[in-house]
Amino acid sequence: MYIKKILWAVALIGLVIMGGFAFYIYTNIFSPNTAFNNEEAHVYIPTGASFSDVREELEPLLDNMSSFEKVANKKGYASNIKSGHYIIEKGMNNNDIINTIRSKNIPIFVKFNNQERLENLAGQLAGQIEPDSLSLLEAMRDPAFLKEAGLNNATAMSVYIPNTYELYWNTTTEGFRDRMLKEYKAFWTAERDQKAKELGLTHTEVISLAAIVQKETAKADERPRVAGVYTNRLKKGMLLQADPTVIYAKKLSENNFDQIIKRVLYVDLEIDSPYNTYKYTGVPPGPISMPDISSIDGVLNHENHDYIFFVADVTNFGYHKFAKTLAQHNRNKQEYVRWVNANGVNR
């Protein structure tokens, strides 16, 4: 009888211990440990982060940091931290959280628009992916990369076609740059390549001409017509005489890309720069901005017409009036000049 009591006591103690252990396991590993109200939270763990850095990132998101630390140590996470972008869902437990930030790096969507310089692009990207703007700019200008890609300092912008791209947040500077080159090569399909050859232009020259078209009109439906004007001028051996190139030349010569220039003055036309298409024939040595795909395709699929001139249409803002003769163009231009003077647009 006495032995039975001992056995029952031992069994009861065992059950208590097992229950306590089970409670410990549940509390620390399998019970929810999130403190945010949204359905999910985004976590960014930088390259070379320590466990202390991870704790700092997760602190506002967790109910119980102590239990998280215990499980992280048990699972060996503290000595095997992975950088990247992770999504923690509401109600996740410590086990799920650690499994997520250890192996489920989620891609992000990176967007960039029409920038005039690589410096501006690098700054825009630095707010979206891990690398800073200086390291991005250095990678973009790397002489070895440019040589291998068949580019130079003037044409280096050509490979960055404004779009939305899916990549990892912790992509390296070289990884981003190489990915853009890969996208650029894929963009130049056999059909696009053939159309560039028919124009007698290289890929980078098409990009450079598209950049002018992009600056001339914000209306995508008008870009093929504007591109047709410039291809006509090229065929005739005429100067392109594109005001956006003069504006770019002025900004470049003064090293001031922050200035806003709404009107080109006659004195600006005398700027001695290979980008000044009032002085130098042909396409500029490189793009004056990063043109949209619609502008590039606008050049490759330009309208076949006889227009040689165009000027802003003050009766239909955003669009232009086109002319086949200088006399017709001068009449259109006079209307534009009267409007400019009446509205006090001096610069």
Image (cartoon, grey):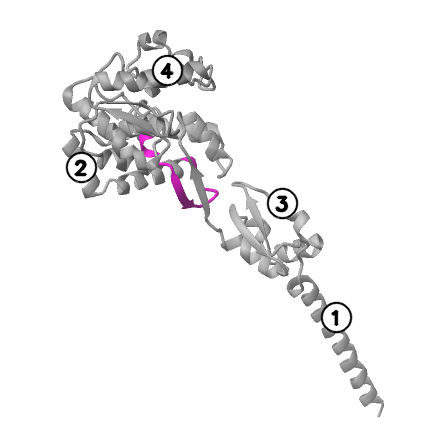
Residue at mark 2 to residue at mark 4: CA–CA distance: 37 Å
Q: Does residue 197 belong to the magenta stretch?
A: no
Assign a secondary structure to mark 3.
helix
Q: Nearer the viewer, mark 2 or mark 3?
A: 2
Badge 1 is on which residue?
Answer: 20
Name the kind of residue labelled 3 in the image: Glu
Q: Nearer the viewer, mark 1 or mark 2?
A: 2
Assign a secondary structure to mark 2.
helix
Relative to 107, residue 296 above or below? above
Residue 325: x and y, percent?
A: 20, 20
At x 34%, y 32%, the residue is: 291
Badge 3 is on which residue?
Answer: 57
In the image, 64 versus 224, the foreground residue is 224
Badge 4 is on which residue?
Answer: 337
Relative to 122, residue 72 above or below? below
In the image, 323 versus 40, the foreground residue is 323
Query: Which numbered disc, 3 or 1, marks the residue that appears first in the sequence?
Result: 1
Name the kind of residue labelled 2 in the image: Lys
- Residue stretch in magenta: 157-173
Residue 296: x and y, percent?
A: 28, 35
The part of the image, by quadrant, that contains residue 20 is: bottom right
**Do callouts 3 and 1 mark residues in contact (Cβ within 8 Å)?**
no
Name the kind of residue labelled 1 in the image: Gly
Residue 207: x and y, percent?
A: 28, 30
The part of the image, by quadrant, that contains residue 308 is: top left
Query: Which numbered disc, 4 or 3, marks the residue that appears first in the sequence?
Result: 3
